[in-house]
Amino acid sequence: MKSPFTISYKKKLDKQIKEDIINLFIINISGTNYKKIERINDDKLIVKGSLFNWPFENSIMTLWVGFCKKAELVFKNNYILYSVDYTYGVVNLLLAILVGGIPALLFSLDINIYYYIMSFILGIGMLHIIFRLSLHRQVFINTLKLKNRFKGNYSWTEILENKTNQELKDIVRGNTTLTLEVQKMAKEEIDRRRNN
């Protein structure tokens, strides 16, 4: 049964570049604390999240923990569909209302304070859900535009051409914070220099 807490984004594809989109989507969600990725043929990708996580594993770009139960990236005909099941976000909102509401109700002499606290928790929770859904949408849109969120808008070819051989070797070895894609480009630059 489909969750009532699912939102979908759909886009028509001009070209069939499924493999590029799936690979780039996986790159773009790396570091966002998903639990597991399942790839079904070349037409479907399922990303699963978890309800809770250890505090030291959280990051600003967390799209999954405590928010997204699962997300599906599906290719049908000439369309791509990205569905986000945010059931965990709703569960956490209800838990926050419950945990935040009981002490306010027990220790408050004025019922209006209780309503203010519940309204505040509900408002913050709704903003949190909207924010997380917008992050999912942004990852989806950037992936369709073939933007790699780790590469940025830099001219890596030009940057790497101006690096010394030692700097390129450090990049290839992973002694920097640059991505695997940039490491691969640095290796290609080293190979290009050797061949010239």
Image (spheres, grey):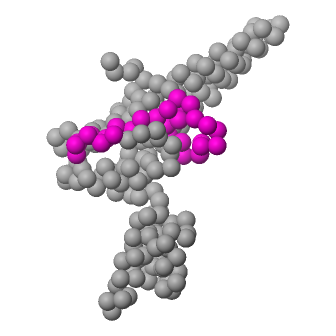
Figure quadrant of the N terminus: top left
Residue projecting furthest to the bottom: 196
**Residue closer to the observer: 121 or 70:** 70
Q: Quadrant of residue 3?
A: top left
- Residue span colored magenta: 38-67
| Depicted 29 relative to depicted 36: above or below | below
Q: Magenta stretch: dominant SS?
A: loop
Residue 132 appears in the rendering: yes
Q: Position of residue 141 (x, y in %)?
A: 38, 48
Tell me which residue sits at (39%, 38%) in the image.
47
Q: Position of residue 26 (x, y in %)?
A: 38, 50
Q: Position of residue 62 (x, y in %)?
A: 54, 42
Residue projecting furthest to the front: 173
| Depicted 177 relative to depicted 36: above or below | below
Residue projecting furthest to the left: 77
**Residue closer to the observer: 185 or 16:** 185
| Depicted 192 relative to depicted 100: above or below | below
